[in-house]
Image: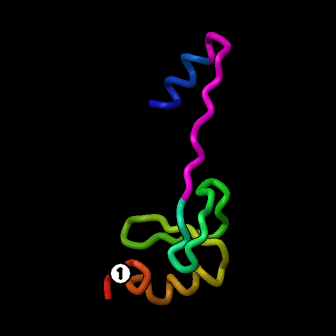
């Protein structure tokens, strides 16, 4: 929907800035830009974003610990 709106506005010389999506690193709590995140893990059909390879490794070794499953 936003892309369509952006295209329509563009025809009139107007520009729509799309909001940057953010996520929180489940291990350390840091807020990250989803688009710029270099460390990403998929678990249970969801994508999770991390600030470092270390945080990603901690999550992948025991995802339920960080998802509140234990």
* Residue sitting farthest toward the top: 12
The reply to whether the magenta stretch includes residue 67 is no
In front here: 64 or 43?
A: 64
Where in the figure is residue 34, as x and y percent of width and height? 59, 57
Q: Which residues are magenta?
A: 10-22
Nearest the eye: 34 or 41: 34
Percent coordinates x, y for residue 55 in the rendering:
60, 81
Does the magenta portion include 16? yes
> Which residue in the structure is indicated by mark 1?
68
Q: Is residue 53 above or below residue 30?
A: below
User: Which quadrant is the C terminus positioned in?
Assistant: bottom left
- Classify residue 59 as left or right of residue 30: left
User: Which quarter of the figure has residue 31?
Assistant: bottom right
- Check the picture and name the quadrant holding the N terminus: top left
The quarter of the picture where residue 11 lies is top right
Element assignment for label 1: loop
Image x and y of residue 27, in percent: 54, 80
């Amino acid at each position: 929907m936003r892309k369509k709106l952006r295209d329509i506005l563009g025809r009139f010389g107007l520009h729509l800035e799309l909001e940057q999506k953010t996520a929180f690193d489940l291990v350390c709590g840091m807020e990250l830009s989803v688009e710029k995140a270099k460390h990403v893990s998929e678990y249970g059909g969801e994508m999770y974003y991390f600030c470092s390879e270390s945080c990603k490794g901690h999550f992948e070794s025991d995802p339920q610990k960080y998802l509140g499953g234990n």
